[in-house]
Image (cartoon, rainbow, N blue to C red):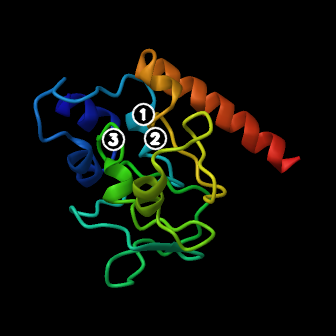
C-alpha cells in the first residue's frame, strides 16, 4: 500500500503523511482509483495536525489550539478525517469543539440529548455541517464504502440544488 501511495501522490511528504502506520486491513481500506490522486490537485491541501485538535473554524478557515490559522487561503470545503469511533468519538474528540447556532458543541449536544440525526448526515442546530458514514447513517446497514458513495451522491445533488 505504501508503494501504491508513493506512485500515486506526487509530493513525497504528503505521500508519507497519507501512508498508514498500522498493518494493511487493520482498519477500513480506502477502495477507489482516485483517492490518492486527489492530493495532487492544486485545490486540495492536507493538514496533518500531529494529534492536535482544531479549536475553531472561522471565515479564515480552521485554527489550532493557539488560535493560529492552519491554512492561509479561502476554503470552499473543509473535510475532517478524524479516524474511527463508531458513535461519538469524533464528536468528543477532534470535532467536539464544533459549535452550533446556540454555541453548544456537538459533543455537548450528543452527551445531553443522545445522537439525533437526519439520514445520519445532518443534526439540528448545526446548519451547513454534513456528516458522512457516521452514526445513524445508512452505512451501518450495508457496505460502508457503497453507502458512503450514496451519501456523497445525495450531498452533491443537494449542493447543486442549493446553488440554483
> In front here: 105 or 164?
105
Say which residue label 3 marks.
9
Residue 45 lies in quadrant: bottom left
Mark 1, secondary structure of its residue? helix
Q: Is residue 117 above or below residue 33?
A: below
Residues packed near mark 2 inside 10 Å, few (<14), some (14 to 19) or many (20 plus): some
Q: Position of residue 152 (x, y in %)?
A: 59, 32
Circle 1/circle 2 CB separation < 8 Å:
yes
Q: Is residue 126 visible?
A: yes
Mark 2, secondary structure of its residue? helix
Q: Residue at x 33, y 57 (%)?
A: 92
Q: Is residue 102 above or below residue 116?
A: below
Relative horizontal placement of residue 9, taking residue 21 as reference (left or right): right
Q: Is residue 158 above or below residue 49?
A: above
> In front here: 121 or 38?
121
Q: Is residue 75 above or below residue 130?
A: below
Q: CA distance from mark 3 to mark 1?
A: 10 Å
Q: Position of residue 123 (x, y in %)?
A: 59, 49
Q: CA distance from mark 2 to mark 3?
A: 8 Å
In the image, farthest residue toward the top: 142
**Of labels 3 and 1, the one closer to you:** 1
Say which residue label 2 marks.
38
Amino acid at each position: 500500500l505504501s508503494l501504491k501511495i508513493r506512485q500515486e501522490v506526487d509530493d513525497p511528504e504528503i505521500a508519507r503523511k497519507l501512508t498508514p502506520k498500522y498493518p494493511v486491513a487493520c482498519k477500513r481500506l480506502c477502495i477507489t482509483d482516485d483517492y490518492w490522486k486527489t492530493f495532487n490537485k492544486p485545490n486540495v491541501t492536507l493538514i496533518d495536525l500531529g494529534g492536535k485538535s482544531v479549536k475553531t473554524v472561522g471565515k479564515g478557515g480552521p485554527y489550532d489550539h493557539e488560535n493560529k490559522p492552519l491554512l492561509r487561503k479561502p476554503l470552499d470545503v473543509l473535510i475532517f478525517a478524524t479516524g474511527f469511533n463508531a458513535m461519538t468519538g469524533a464528536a468528543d474528540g477532534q470535532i467536539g469543539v464544533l459549535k452550533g447556532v446556540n454555541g453548544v458543541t456537538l459533543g455537548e449536544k450528543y452527551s445531553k440529548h443522545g445522537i439525533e440525526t437526519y439520514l445520519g448526515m445532518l443534526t439540528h442546530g448545526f446548519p451547513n455541517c454534513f456528516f458522512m458514514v457516521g452514526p445513524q447513517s445508512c452505512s451501518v446497514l450495508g457496505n460502508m464504502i457503497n453507502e458512503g458513495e450514496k451519501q456523497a451522491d445525495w450531498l452533491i445533488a443537494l449542493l447543486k440544488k442549493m446553488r440554483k
